[in-house]
Every structure is written in C-alpha cells, then in structure tokens.
Amino acid sequence: MKFLVTGGFGFIGGHLIQRLLEAEHTVHVVDNLSTSPVPLTVLMSDLKNPLNLTYDIDDLHNWLHYNDDTEWDVIFHLASPVGPAGILPFAGKMAYYIVRDTVKLIRLAQRSNARLVDVSTSEIYGGGEAGYCREDMPRIVPAETTVRLEYAMGKLAAETALINECQINDLRAAIIRPFNVSGPRQSGQGGFVLPRFVAQAMTGQPLTVFGDGSQVRAFTHVRDIVSGIIEAADYLNRYSRKARGQAFNLGNPANKTTILNLAERVINEVGSASAIQFLDGREVYGPHYAEAADKYPDASRAIKELRWQPQYDIEATIRSVHLYMTWSAANTFHELSGIEAKHPLWTV
Ligand SMILES: NC(=O)c1ccc[n+]([C@@H]2O[C@H](COP(=O)([O-])OP(=O)(O)OC[C@H]3O[C@@H](n4cnc5c(N)ncnc54)[C@H](O)[C@@H]3O)[C@@H](O)[C@H]2O)c1
C-alpha cells in the first residue's frame, strides 16, 4: 500500500506515519516543516522501518503543482495552519489556502482512484448546541468575524467541496473532525493548552487560564485520533458506497472537562506548587486571538461505523504529555542523532 501523508511531520501526522510504518506500509510525506513540533531528526529517531519512508520538504501547493500524476492508494490530508495562535499569521488568506489545497488533493485522489481522508476540525460546528456537537446538526456561524472563524469556514468549505465530489463525481473520501487533541510531541507554540500548562507546572510558574476557565473541552490522546484516521481509510475500503462523503467526530466524550479543571489536574499530576492565574488570552497572543466556544463530541458515529474505541482517559493523556516533556527537558534535541536515541517514554 502506498500512502501519501500531507503534514506528516506535524504533531498528529508524526504519530500517523509512525503507525503506518510500524505496519510496514510505504509512506510519502509532504511537509514544509513550518509548524512541525520537533526537529525532523528527532522524529526520525522514533520511526520503525525508516526505509519505507520518503519525503519532500515543500509547500503542499507547490508540490502538487509538480506531482499531480503519481498513483496513491490512500491520501491522508493534514497539512494546514492550526492552533489558536498558530492560525493568526494566516489571517485573510487561510480560507483560500485550505480550500485550494484540499480541492487539488481531491483531483489527485480522483486521478489515481485513491481513498482520501481529510482531517478537518470540530471548529466547523461553531459551538454546536451549548458545546455538544453531533455530525447531523446544523453548522452554526457565530456573529463575530475572527481569524478563528476564517479557519473554521475554510475547513467547512473544503469539506463541502469534498462531500459534493463524493456525491456527484464518485470521489472515495471521508472527513475526520478531531476535537482537542494532545499527547507526546505536541508543542505549546501554536497556543495548545495542555503542553503549556504542563510546562508551566514543571517550572513552578502560574498556569495561565484564559477567561474564568469554564470553557468545556474533551481532550483526546493523539494515538486514539490516529486510530480513527486509519479506521476511516479502512471504512472507505469496506463500504465503497455508503462511506463516501461521511464525516466523523473524533473526540473522547468521557474526557470532557473545563479548562480550570484541566489546570488543577495538571498541577496534581506534576506535583507542582504552581498557582493558577486568570487572564485574557489577548494579553498573551494579541488582539486577534479568540477563544473557541465550548465544544465536546458525540462520537457515537465513529464508535459504531469505524469501530473506534478510544483507549486513553484524561489522566493518561495528561500523564503522557508530562512524561514526554520531562524526558525532552532532560535530553536536548541536538543530542539525538540516530536510532539509538529512541526513548521508551515516546511510546507511553
Ligand atoms: N491538534 C489539534 O488539536 C487539532 C484539532 C482539530 C483539527 N486538527 C487538524 O489536524 C491537522 C494536523 O494538526 P496538528 O495538530 O498535527 O498540527 P501541526 O502544525 O503539528 O501539523 C501540521 C503539519 O503540516 C505542515 N504544513 C502546514 N502547512 C503546510 C503547507 N502549506 N505545505 C506543507 N506542509 C504544511 C506543518 O509543517 C506541520 O508539520 C490539521 O489539519 C488541523 O487542522 C488538529
């Protein structure tokens, strides 16, 4: 099987290619390394069967221009601006980029009769019904226009094009809508809260909770998300007709928590004396930062159709971030140059 993974050196993508290579698949990654959370050598040191991996360090749009005739069995599309802070530099052009790249991948999938799994986002619900999000609910567009809205609308427009191509032109594609993902190798840089809290707790700094901390989220371990992404490709293989154009929430409803409660759990896990400090996220990330609305998934469609079974509860998810960050604080990345540098904590 020949897999193309866009954004395969990112946080989720790195875990995805790790799983594919373990299963002895052949994987090609296209990634411009713009937001990859760890240096490539560090990621490489953790990959089994590295000879099955090829890659191009390139912008996806540019790469597609010169590589539109290769045959693929499965395409996983993850390359995108991401993160509440990470999206801010893309204001005004992000929706265009997201739609343009997805539509080009749709064409590539059609030309090679590949299965395409588009990794979208739970942000397309705009908050659902008081945070609760089920796939067959209307999408609600909030009144306020923010950079975050442009990200959500770009993803939603790309989904819409993909679903129409499935219904009208026989594309074999499915959509994954991850909720809040976390786990080893995630960086706090894009504005992701769990690695930020863990870093703050480990260094005795106050945990910075934006607003009053009552925001509802459901954090899901990256390995569970990767299982669901791969299961979506299998589902497209099993059910050639009914699977096309289906969208699946991926988020563990059992891990529902408020951000304040998450901060308290992190302090407890780390055994830290850190305080909790409440502030406005705009003080940290600037005036264009916006908080997500409350959101948590109904995951019953993925559980029933994809046979998705999330394995990691919230404690295990927090612990895996803590163990990884403890290890990476003790091992500077430049010391890692080869396979022998592999560390067991990465498989926590
Ligand atoms: N992390 C989450 O909580 C979350 C939640 C919902 C949806 N998602 C979606 O999952 C996908 C992966 O997110 P992630 O958390 O792994 O982010 P990430 O930033 O770690 O990974 C994205 C990867 O894509 C690459 N990339 C970005 N733009 C590119 C381009 N134009 N050309 C080539 N490479 C490019 C980056 O260098 C990076 O390695 C994204 O599509 C995101 O929208 C993530």
Image (cartoon, rainbow, N blue to C red):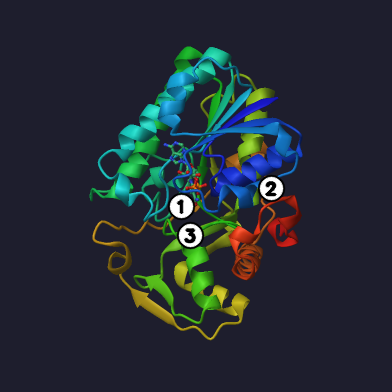
In this rendering, the answer to whether 29 lies above or below 34 is above
Choose between 329 and 88: the one closer to the eye.
329
Of pointers 1 and 2, the one earlier in the residue sequence? 1
In this rendering, the answer to whether 302 lies above or below 293 is above
Where does the C terminus fall, quadrant-wise? bottom right
Task: Give residue 11's position: percent from left, percent from top.
Answer: 55, 49
Choose between 117 and 29: the one closer to the eye.
29
Would you name the residue on which mark 3 appears? 217
Task: Give residue 232's position: percent from left, percent from top.
Answer: 62, 34
Would you name the residue on which mark 1 appears? 132
Crowding near the residue tagged with mark 1, few <14, some 14–19, many ≥20 C-alpha atoms within 10 Å: some
Numbered disc 3: secondary structure: strand
Residue at (52% x, 16% y) in the render = 110
Decide if ligand 1 comes within 8 Å of the CB at mark 2: no
Would you name the residue on which mark 2 appears? 309
Numbered disc 1: secondary structure: strand
Crowding near the residue tagged with mark 3, few <14, some 14–19, many ≥20 C-alpha atoms within 10 Å: many
Of pointers 3 and 1, the one earlier in the residue sequence? 1
Amino acid under label 2? Answer: Gln
Mark 2 → mark 3, Cα distance in angstroms:
19 Å
Task: Give residue 201's position: percent from left, percent from top.
Answer: 52, 77
